[in-house]
Image (cartoon, grey):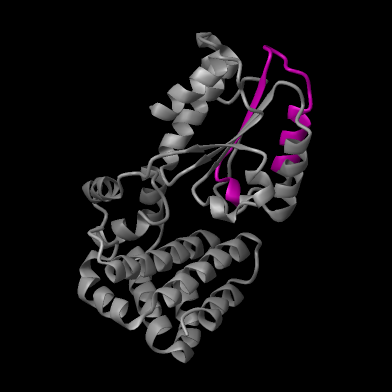
């Protein structure tokens, strides 16, 4: 990959940064590059060391991730404690934080202090598919590594090959690019019903705001937990992205491919400013949801401050 090649060149030229922010929508590629880069820094070809990194038991390496909607404060405290220690097996220490936007405000501030005064020979690799939700002060202290957009249609086709309904596969592609994550969500929840409710709510946002407020009750009955609520926000955002694509008459494949006529009709009704305002409200809603704000209040704000 081009990204890994550039990072390897930086390492071999003794031009390592103390912090990297990987940005893009291809989570699998970012994770692969992060792990390979960590192995290069820590092991430099030592296969036994690389095996330890792969199994997360190399003492100078730490990988932080969470299946929940937020990375816990305790995980960050443990990270800071370990990374403040001297290297045990080599020259460097490396830590990776997956889905960095999942950090709480407290967690981000802890990492910010850590980035401002990093221990010697410590390299941070932060990954995010939603960099707009990260503090500007974090951005300014990292070297940015941008990943090419994933082939969304290819990912959707792969999900369909695993017997996932195409409409559901399209919706899942707005939330994740990881096959296992998408399959688990599909197996655990009735996503066909959730998609139907999401589409109806999006239409109410445009045509009948008072009913959209009432519709939040039904929406949250189907999106019962933070993971499904995050998926819902991603799917709502995609609905308005489709409208924007129709508005500017681009040739992009619609995420809601079965709703092309409806999408194009809404594009005629809404102004560019109204669509952009909706994007802003959904981004803000993502941040609030990660901060554990009551989901009813989060979705109410989209209705109240969104399309007017």
- Tag count: 0
Q: Residue at x 22, y 59 (%)?
A: 251
Residue 27 at x, y percent in the picture: 44, 42
Q: Residue at x 27, y 54 (%)?
A: 164
Q: Which residues are magenta?
A: 75-101
Residue 4 at x, y percent in the picture: 45, 25
Is residue 62 visible in the rendered image? The answer is: no
Q: Residue at x 45, y 61 (%)?
A: 231
Q: Residue at x 51, y 30 (%)?
A: 34
Residue 78, magenta (yes or no): yes
Q: Nearer the viewer, residue 25 or 191?
A: 25
Q: Within the image, what quadrant is residue 194 found in?
A: bottom left
Classify 151 as above or below 210: above
Q: Within the image, what quadrant is residue 3 found in?
A: top left
Q: Is residue 269 left or right of residue 34?
A: left
Q: Nearer the viewer, residue 263 or 94?
A: 263
Q: Within the image, what quadrant is residue 297 found in?
A: bottom right
Tell me the quarter of the image containing the N terminus.
top left
Residue 9, magenta (yes or no): no
Residue 42 at x, y percent in the picture: 60, 17
């Amino acid at each position: 990959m081009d990204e890994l090649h550039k990072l390897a060149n930086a390492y071999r030229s003794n031009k390592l940064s103390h912090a990297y922010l990987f940005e893009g929508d291809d989570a699998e590629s970012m994770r692969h590059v992060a792990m390979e880069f960590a192995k290069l820094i820590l092991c430099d070809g030592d296969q036994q060391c690389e095996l330890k990194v792969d199994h997360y038991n190399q003492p100078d390496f730490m990988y932080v991730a969470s299946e929940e909607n937020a990375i816990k404060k305790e995980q960050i405290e443990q990270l800071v404690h370990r990374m403040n220690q001297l290297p045990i097996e080599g020259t460097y220490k490396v830590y990776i934080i997956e889905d960095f936007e999942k950090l709480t405000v407290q967690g981000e501030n802890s990492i910010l202090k850590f980035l401002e005064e990093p221990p010697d020979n410590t390299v941070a690799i932060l990954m995010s598919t939603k960099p707009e939700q990260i503090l500007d002060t974090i951005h300014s202290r990292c070297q940015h590594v941008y990943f090419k957009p994933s082939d969304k249609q290819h990912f959707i086709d792969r999900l369909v090959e695993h017997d996932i309904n195409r409409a559901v596969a399209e919706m899942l592609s707005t939330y994740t690019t990881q096959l296992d994550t998408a399959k688990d969500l599909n197996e655990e929840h009735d996503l066909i019903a959730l998609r139907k409710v999401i589409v109806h709510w999006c239409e109410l946002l445009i045509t009948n705001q008072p009913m959209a407020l009432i519709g939040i009750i039904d929406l949250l009955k189907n999106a019962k937990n933070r993971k499904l609520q995050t998926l819902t926000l991603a799917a709502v955002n995609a609905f308005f992205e489709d409208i924007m694509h129709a508005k500017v008459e681009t040739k992009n494949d619609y995420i809601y491919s079965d709703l092309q006529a409806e999408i194009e009709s809404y594009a005629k009704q809404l102004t560019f400013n109204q669509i952009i305002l909706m994007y802003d409200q959904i981004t803000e809603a993502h941040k609030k949801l990660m901060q554990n704000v009551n989901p009813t209040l989060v979705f109410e704000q989209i209705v109240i401050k969104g399309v007017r």
